Amino acid sequence: MHDYKGFYSDILYGEYKYTNTSGQLLINTLDKIDYSYTSKSYHNITGATFIPNNLPVKCNDCNLGEFRVESSFKDPERKGLIGTGVIFRYINPTTIKVLIIGSKGKVLESETGNLPDQLRVPSAEYTMTKQ
């Protein structure tokens, strides 16, 4: 149960680790999963909005009545990105499909104007397998 200014709701939150195809570890925030933030929304994955199959991003191979959950997705070294997210799709008890949604731009500018405008995790669908 999450208390957001007097409104209570269930919330999905988490952290992640990303290793690129060359085997280089780019992001690892797993050590922050038990951190006592004043709000769960400070985690790098937060929120739980149920989305039907026919809303963007459409799911052409989802079963009738299957639902997905959308959450915000943050890169701790890329602040100010707009519209980044993750969509979780339950496949079976040991498998979840994860779709990373890239940035639609940035809201922060630096003095040099060279802030990255995309996540370090590429926009793609990934399969998570419980081990």
Image: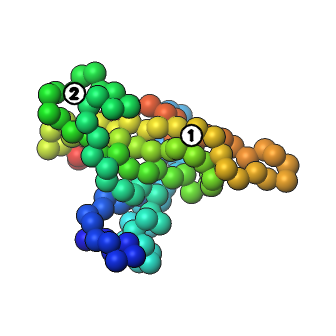
- Tags 2 and 1 in contact by the CB under 8 Å rule? no
Q: Earlier in the sequence, mark 2 or mark 1?
A: 2
Give the left or right position of residue 46, taking residue 76 as reference.
Answer: left
Pick whichever, 67 or 76, lies toward us.
67
Quadrant of the rendering where the N terminus is positioned: bottom left
Image mark count: 2
Give the left or right position of residue 89, taking residue 64 as reference.
Answer: right
Asked if residue 35 is positioned above or below residue 82 in the image, the reply reads: below
How many residues crowd around disc 1 within 10 Å: few (fewer than 14), some, or many (20 or more)? some
Pick whichever, 111 or 25, lies toward us.
111
Q: Amino acid at mark 2?
A: Cys
**Which residue appears at 31% of the width and 53% of the height?**
48
Residue 61: x and y in percent read: 24, 22
Pick whichever, 34 or 80, lies toward us.
80
Residue 131 visible to an observer of this rendering: yes
**Badge number at residue 103:** 1
Residue 80: x and y in percent read: 63, 53
Q: Which residue is mark 2?
A: 62
